[in-house]
């Protein structure tokens, strides 16, 4: 449905000054690296870890935000909560915002993935690589396909998250040290954007909004607890930090079991939700009649084309969606979507078939534009303080991060 009355909304510049000239946020002279697999983290990072109360081998978590082109490393402190220790500008990712659906679609994964030591590839042709674990249980039960989706070096992507070689050297070291410390799985959270109220409103007309609302529950989990949520799949959807009661169990294709929720978490999420709801209402007024145009990969590449000068042909930075995208009137966005839908229908039509009618086009657009954008409701999550082990002899003391290690 078209929105007939528009309020002009100006979007503030979202790209940081000079970010195009600073893709290589990790600066290491690779010619002096004798053993890339065992290359230690830089002294500066080790010093920051110490200041934050982090041990070198404590667990990590990885968060990716496509729209901002950001990859973050979060690390456990001695209080069993995570804090951000490093962030990097993603050099290249392919496709647009939205999950990977099938092999060859050039989409980079979105969702929650578990990385083990086996996901590390020290012999990658892209310097170093970490397999994202796609497809996971959610992807598989929903028929999504694809192979070899990586976080790797070389700054060139076909469905991967590609960093510079200097960046992936550090990211690999973070994961290596965490596995050496006993972490059995590293959680990778891949989001289309930071799931703030304003961003959810900007993208409310995107056809992926229902999927993103589901991911947002996991996003909220982490924002409240500052600990990677426990992820399960049932009824072909993600559930986060939920405790199955009785004899119930989680099955990707089966019905979700009965679950219990500690009151402490319910209260924490309710408080978080009130703030979010208020921010969402403000954003709806701010962006009345406007929505975000998500740029294509080609449009993103055009913005950062100058970065390729003087480099190898394989070096192919893609830029961020924030740099290449824009706010447009909803009516204009609907027309753009209708045009693309018509083109797709025409391209896939059987030979000799009649052109799609205007009514068919309108139905296709309506299916892609929800009439109402639901505000995600808090999901029952397990939120209880981690019990600290009783003091024992140093020789047999279990590292605090074993809480995350699966037996």
Image (cartoon, rainbow, N blue to C red):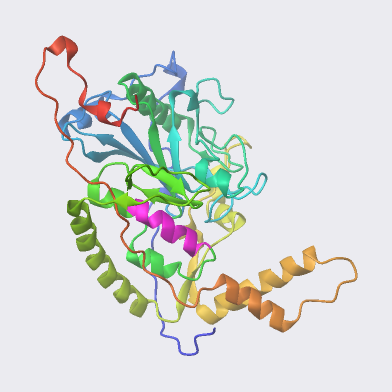
Residue 336 visible in the shown view: no
Q: Residue most toward the left?
A: 391
User: Measuring 85% from the left and 76% from the top, which residue is drawn there?
Assistant: 354
2 on left or right of 79: right
Q: Residue most toward the bottom?
A: 5
Residue 115, above or below 194: above
Residue 310 visible in the shown view: yes
Q: Nearer the viewer, residue 105 or 89?
A: 105
Q: Nearer the viewer, residue 51 or 109?
A: 109
Q: Quadrant of residue 351?
A: bottom right
Q: Nearer the viewer, residue 311 or 203?
A: 203
Q: Quadrant of the C terminus?
A: top left
Q: Residue most toward the front?
A: 247
Residue 94, above or below 323: above
User: Measuring 32% from the left and 57% from the top, which residue is drawn there?
Assistant: 379
* In magenta segment, residue 216: yes
User: Measuring 66% from the left and 44% from the top, which residue is drawn there?
Assistant: 103
Q: Quadrant of residue 296?
A: bottom right
| Picture coordinates of residue 349, whole percent (x, y) | 81, 67
| Picture coordinates of residue 281, whole percent (x, y) | 31, 75
Q: Nearer the viewer, residue 265 or 325?
A: 265
Q: Residue most toward the right?
A: 352
Residue 402, above or below 159: above
| Picture coordinates of residue 220, whole percent (x, y) | 31, 54
Q: What's the magenta bit mostly, secondary-structure-wise?
A: helix
Residue 101, above or below 40: below
Q: Quadrant of the N terminus?
A: bottom right
144 on left or right of 269: right
* In magenta segment, residue 103: no
**Which residues, given as a range, are shown in magenta?**
208-219
């Amino acid at each position: 449905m078209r929105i007939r009355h528009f309020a002009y909304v100006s979007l503030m510049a979202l790209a940081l000054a000079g970010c195009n000239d600073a893709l290589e946020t990790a600066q290491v002279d690779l010619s002096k690296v004798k053993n890339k697999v065992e290359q230690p983290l830089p002294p500066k990072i080790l010093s920051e870890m110490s200041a934050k109360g982090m041990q070198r081998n404590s667990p990590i978590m990885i968060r990716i935000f496509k729209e901002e082109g950001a990859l973050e490393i979060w690390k456990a402190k001695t209080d069993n909560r995570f804090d951000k220790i490093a962030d990097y500008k993603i050099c290249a990712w392919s496709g647009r915002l939205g999950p990977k659906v099938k092999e060859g679609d050039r989409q980079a994964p979105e969702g929650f993935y578990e990385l083990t030591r086996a996901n590390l590839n020290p012999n990658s042709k892209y310097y170093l690589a970490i397999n994202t674990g796609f497809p996971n249980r959610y992807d598989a039960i929903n028929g999504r396909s694809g192979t070899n989706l990586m976080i790797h070096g070389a700054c060139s992507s076909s469905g991967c998250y590609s960093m510079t070689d200097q960046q992936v050297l550090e990211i690999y070291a973070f994961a290596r040290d965490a596995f050496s410390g006993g972490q059995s799985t590293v959680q990778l959270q891949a989001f289309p954007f930071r799931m703030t109220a304003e961003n959810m409103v900007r993208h409310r007309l995107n056809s992926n909004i229902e999927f993103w609302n589901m991911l947002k529950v996991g996003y909220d989990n982490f924002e409240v607890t500052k600990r990677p949520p426990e992820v399960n799949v049932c009824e072909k959807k993600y559930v986060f930090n939920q405790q199955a009661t009785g004899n119930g169990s989680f099955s990707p294709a089966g019905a979700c079991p009965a679950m219990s929720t500690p009151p402490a978490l319910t209260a924490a999420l309710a408080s978080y939700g009130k703030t979010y709801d208020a921010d969402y209402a403000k954003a709806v007024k701010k962006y009345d009649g406007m929505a975000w145009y998500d740029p294509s990969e080609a449009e993103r590449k055009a913005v950062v084309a100058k970065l390729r000068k003087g480099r190898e042909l394989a070096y192919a930075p893609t830029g961020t969606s924030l740099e290449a995208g824009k706010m447009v009137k909803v009516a204009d966005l609907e027309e753009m979507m209708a045009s693309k839908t018509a083109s797709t229908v025409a391209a896939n039509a059987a030979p000799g078939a009649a052109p799609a009618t205007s009514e068919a086009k309108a139905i296709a657009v309506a299916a892609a534009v929800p009439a109402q954008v639901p505000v995600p409701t808090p999901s029952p999550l397990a939120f209880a303080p981690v019990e600290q082990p009783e003091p024992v002899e140093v020789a047999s003391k279990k590292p605090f991060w074993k809480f995350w290690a699966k037996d």
